[in-house]
Amino acid sequence: MLVTAKEMLEKAKAGKYAVGQFNINNLEWTKAILQTAQELNSPVILGVSEGAGKYMTGYKTVVGMVNGMLEELNITVPVALHLDHGSYEGCLKCVEAGFSSIMFDGSHYPIDENVEKTKELVKIAADNHMSLEAEVGAIGGEEDGVIGKGECADPDECKRIADLGVTMLAAGIGNIHGVYPENWEGLSFETLEAISEKTGDMPLVLHGGTGIPADQIKKAISLGVAKINVNTECQIAFAQATRKYIEAGKDQQGKGFDPRKLLLPGTEAIKDIVKEKMELFGSVGKA
Ligand code: 13P
């Protein structure tokens, strides 16, 4: 059964480790992530962007697929199904569809409007027993077609949003989605420390988990990050493994193209990344 992200993140924050959010795009990714979490006895969050939700034909299909897998794969570790970077309307749709967690990304609104909309969603999430992630300070890179600049959030604005009663807070600390440019300056630990100080026990979320060096990940966790999102790294590994398989000509052997075999190397590549991240984040054995 799906659970909210609340308990797993409170435990992670107190235990100084982080739970991984791995984005899903199809059945293969979902299965790979769930099986790895179960194998490593780790809690996990499945992230679904609005674009991925649409691709998978809609949120109800996603809920049906994930619930079916939890049962048929005998998954017993805590799993949250979470809307990633949701709009206000997207959040309402996921409440309706049966997600266990939502993110409202109001970071592109003026702070007062972000506060107003987040406040409404705090009530809706509570009424529906769901966890809610809010965002302050846009995270750079591309989020479903929207390019941000890698801002550092204002700690006072973070406190305003945290005080509304959200479950977890994503705050820009110089992180960006996608591959980091050569001249990236690294995470701003000064900003993270100031946000942690203002928001106390609030589990903080680090987006853009792809390509952040291990020492920076560990330091971020020590300063209050309890959830780390990873997507691009899985996309790259999935594409590379699939291409390698095709280039080897294996897909044309025997009876011809077999989609199940074609997608297997990519699926295995995702398992390896999820394992590596869970070990780095310290969530192994924490289910
Ligand atoms: P990356 O694609 O950079 O790993 O970031 C994922 C993310 O933050 C999803 O919200």
Image (cartoon, helix red, strand yellow):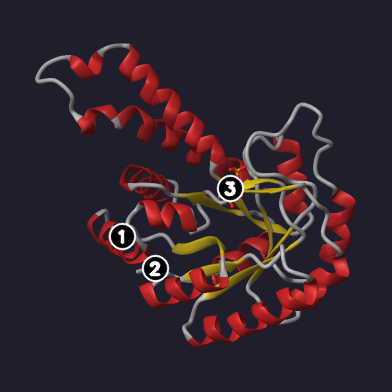
Q: Mark 1 and mark 2 in contact? Answer it, CB < 8 Å.
A: yes
Residue holding disc 2: 2
Q: Is mark 2 within 8 Å of ligand 1?
A: no
Q: Quadrant of residue 131?
A: bottom right
- Look at the picture and state if 93 lies above or below 178: below
Residue holding disc 1: 70
Helix, strand, or loop for circle 1?
Answer: helix
Q: CA distance from mark 1 to mark 2?
A: 8 Å
Q: Three-letter amino acid code at disc 1?
A: Leu
In the shown orientation, is residue 252 left or right of residue 161?
A: left
Q: Quadrant of residue 166?
A: bottom right
Q: CA distance from mark 3 to mark 2?
A: 29 Å
Q: Three-letter amino acid code at disc 2?
A: Leu
Q: Nearer the viewer, residue 16 or 203?
A: 203
Q: Mark 3 and mark 1 in contact? Answer it, CB < 8 Å.
A: no
In the shown orientation, is residue 6 left or right of residue 2?
A: right
Residue holding disc 3: 145
Q: Nearer the viewer, residue 41 or 167?
A: 167
Helix, strand, or loop for circle 2?
Answer: loop
